[in-house]
């Protein structure tokens, strides 16, 4: 697997080489972590969607927090940001519409992430 640098830039807002240097990761290690994130998110995203659909704010907050950490560690801002917004909105009792919008944004970004990971 080779990370698509163009798609990485779209999700991170930065260059892959810059992030690898910051993390002190060789590209192969980053790719392995990205594959774990891909598998984890593939499993957790339907659970997050179910929590949002049922209005379960506690579960929404918990899963969003978990996935936010995954993508923040990968420095993928376009995925971490909607999760942070969803987590905060669920915690604060905010609008379910806002949470659903975050889920839509996350889902779109996750499709790019899947392609990025090859």
Image: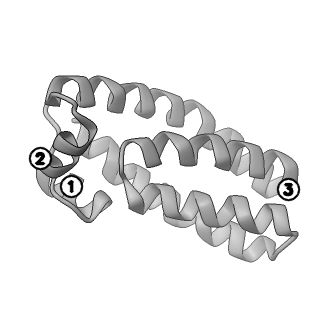
- Looking at marks 3 and 2 on the same chain, the residue that comes earlier in the sequence is marked by 2
Q: Report which residue position mark 3 lands on.
A: 57
Label for residue 17? Answer: 2
On screen, residue 100 above or below 59: below
The crowding category of the residue bearing disc 2, from other C-alpha atoms within 10 Å (few below 14, some 14 to 19, many at least 20), is few
Instruction: Tell me the element at label 1.
Output: helix
- Residue at coordinates 41% horizontally, 33% vertically from top-left? 38
Q: Quadrant of residue 15?
A: bottom left
Give the Cα separation between the discs numbered 3 and 2: 37 Å
The foreground one among 86 and 105 is 86
- Residue at coordinates 86% horizontally, 49% vertically from top-left? 58
> In this rendering, would 61 be left or right of 55?
left
- Looking at marks 3 and 1 on the same chain, the residue that comes earlier in the sequence is marked by 1
On screen, residue 117 above or below 9: above
Query: Which image quadrant: the C terminus?
Result: top left
Give the Cα separation between the discs numbered 3 and 1: 31 Å
- Residue at coordinates 44% horizontally, 32% vertically from top-left? 37
Instruction: Tell me the element at label 3.
Output: helix
Work out whether residue 43 can be spotted: yes
> In this rendering, would 75 be left or right of 50?
left
Q: How many marks?
A: 3
Q: Quadrant of residue 34?
A: top left
Label for residue 7? Answer: 1
Give the mark toward the camera: 2 or 1: 2
Colour mapping used in the image: one colour
Give the mark toward the camera: 3 or 2: 2
The x, y position of residue 41, in whole percent, is 52, 37
- Residue at coordinates 45% horizontally, 49% vertically from top-left? 72
Give the Cα separation between the discs numbered 2 and 1: 13 Å
């Amino acid at each position: 697997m080779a990370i698509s640098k163009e798609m990485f830039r779209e999700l991170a807002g930065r260059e892959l080489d810059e992030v690898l240097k910051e993390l002190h990761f060789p590209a192969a290690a980053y790719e392995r972590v990205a594959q774990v994130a891909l598998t984890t998110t593939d499993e957790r995203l339907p659970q997050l969607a179910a929590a949002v659909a049922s209005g379960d704010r506690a579960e929404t907050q918990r899963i969003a927090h978990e996935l936010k950490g995954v993508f923040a560690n990968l420095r993928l801002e376009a995925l971490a940001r909607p999760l942070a917004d969803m987590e905060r909105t669920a915690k604060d009792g905010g609008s379910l519409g806002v949470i659903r919008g975050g889920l839509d944004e996350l889902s779109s970004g996750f499709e790019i992430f899947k392609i990025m990971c090859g």
